[in-house]
Image (cartoon, rainbow, N blue to C red):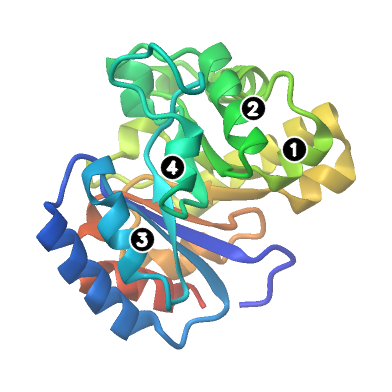
Amino acid sequence: MDKERKLIIAGNWKSNKTVAEALALVADLKRELSAVKEVDIVVAPPYTALESVSKAILDSNIRLGAQNLSADGYGAFTGEIAAGMLKEFSVGYVILGHSERRQYQKESDALVAKKAATALAANLIPIVCIGETLSEREAGITEKVVETQARGSLAGLTAEQVEKTVLAYEPVWAIGTGKTATSAQAQEVHAFIRKVLAAMFGEAVARRVRIQYGGSVKANNARELLGQPDIDGALVGGASLEVRSFADIIKNSI
């Protein structure tokens, strides 16, 4: 697939996999995906498996992501994980502002922006998630919601920092539901997000930022979704927990 921007497909394992299960999965992924060079492949295990997975993928084309980080550094922040702790395990990416954290942990756009700045200062690549709920889509305010989240979650970042950032458009109504935005619906919102980025940071930056789609991505819809001009990859949830489905999504995207 000929794209200006290299595809990036990341597996968000959420709160799943023991260390033993995580190691078994990455061993299979390494074998299945060793020949893939056209796609940046990322896995984001739970914190408990980061160290083990980090060692297991050292000699592979798979990169390591974390599912969150603290907006603050080291210090009296009970239960938080500082960026420096992630760096210790060779983490390269960090998922920020996922809809589940926005919903359950009440994370705001301002907090996501602070976390993104913290990640970038530590040379971690943020994967910043934005997306509307079903009620917001039905109310016809998808673009308003997505623009507000994009502007708020990238506030304070420089154009140079945003170029390094990955955005993930995840319609909340399609996460884990089996519902998927049609390729046309997804492309429409991705193109709109790129227009917002152009307004904020200029056309050249907007052209270079990779925007993933997330929301019930599967092997059988990956090719059509990722073939859209403004869709530069996928943030995969449930389908990333099993070697066959995740590997097939990646292979079908090429």
Disc 4 versus disc 2: distance between alpha carbons? 15 Å
Q: Residue at x 66, y 25 (%)?
A: 154
| Nearer to us: label 3 or label 1 | 3
Please tell me how crowded label 2 is: few (under 14), some (14-19), or many (20+) other residues with Cα within 10 Å. many
Please tell me how crowded label 3 is: few (under 14), some (14-19), or many (20+) other residues with Cα within 10 Å. many
Question: Which residue matches tag 1?
Answer: 161
Secondary element under disc 2, as helix, strand or loop, is helix
Three-letter amino acid code of the residue under disc 2? Ala
Disc 1 versus disc 2: distance between alpha carbons? 8 Å
Which sits in the foreground, 96 or 180?
Answer: 96
Question: Which residue matches tag 2?
Answer: 117
Whether label 2 touches label 3, CB < 8 Å: no
Looking at marks 4 and 2 on the same chain, the residue that comes earlier in the sequence is marked by: 4
Q: In the drawing, does residue 19 fall left or right of residue 159?
A: left
Please tell me how crowded label 4 is: few (under 14), some (14-19), or many (20+) other residues with Cα within 10 Å. many
Disc 3 versus disc 1: distance between alpha carbons? 25 Å
Q: In the drawing, does residue 238 fall left or right of residue 105?
A: left
Question: Which residue matches tag 4?
Answer: 86
Looking at marks 3 and 1 on the same chain, the residue that comes earlier in the sequence is marked by: 3
Secondary element under disc 3, as helix, strand or loop, is helix
Looking at marks 2 and 3 on the same chain, the residue that comes earlier in the sequence is marked by: 3
Three-letter amino acid code of the residue under disc 1? Gln
Numbered mark located on residue 54 in the image: 3
* Residue sitting farthest toward the front: 75
Looking at marks 3 and 4 on the same chain, the residue that comes earlier in the sequence is marked by: 3
User: In the rendered view of the protein, which quadrant contains the N terminus?
Assistant: bottom right
Secondary element under disc 1, as helix, strand or loop, is helix
Q: Residue 246: give x, y in percent of width and height.
A: 30, 67
